[in-house]
Structures are given as structure tokens and as C-alpha cells.
Image: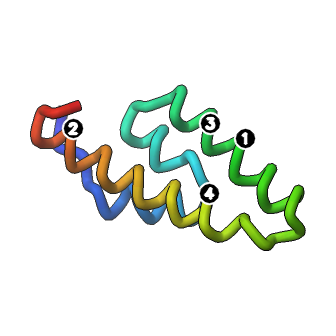
Amino acid sequence: MAPYKPGTAAVLSLLIPGVGQIYNGDFLRAAFWLIITPGFWIGTAGLFGWPFHLISAYTAHRRAQKKNLGLA
């Protein structure tokens, strides 16, 4: 398979948390972010939604880098 693009994974997860993980082929991780992030947005009236949104993008980026290096 062609190398994963970490930037693409991060942007996808920044738009919709979990989609970058789907791009990376990590479907269980995607399900986690697709459930947890909206839960924090709704459950905290947006207060803790942003950190989880950004963490989702960061982890998608790092995971793509690790997959490209053969570490994941």
C-alpha cells in the first residue's frame, strides 16, 4: 500500500474526529473517537470538546507516521 499521509490523517480527524483513524485503517480507534469526542462536546456543553477533537487529530497524525516507519 502507498504510504499514509500524516497531514491528511490529521486534517480528516480535525474535521470529523475518527475519520483520520479510518483513513489509517484503525477502525476500533476510529469508533472510539467517533463516540468519545461528540460525548464530550455534548456532555460538557463544548467545554471539553476541543481538547478531544485536537487529540484525535494528533493521534491520527502520529499513527500515520508510525505506520509509514513500520512501527505500527
Q: In the current view of this chain or complex, which residue is farthest to the left? A: 69
Residue beneath label 3, please? 32
> What residue type is disc 3 on?
Phe
Inter-mark Cα distance, 3 to 4? 12 Å
Name which residue lies at 50% across and 59% down: 55
For marks 3 and 4, the one nearer the N-term is 4
Quarter of the figure that contains the C terminus: top left
- The mark found on residue 67 in the picture is 2
Secondary structure under tag 4 reads loop
Circle 1 residue: 35
Real-space CA distance between mark 4 and mark 1, rounded to the nearest whole angstrom: 11 Å
Residue named by callout 4: 16
Q: CA distance from mark 1 to mark 3?
A: 5 Å
* Residue at x-position 62% and y-position 36%: 32
Q: Distance between the Cα atoms at labels 3 and 2?
A: 19 Å
**Residue 20: x percent and y percent?**
46, 49
Give the secondary structure at mark 2: helix
Q: Nearer the viewer, residue 16 or 58?
A: 58
What's the residue type where badge 4 is placed?
Ile
Q: Which disc is residue 7 wearing?
A: none
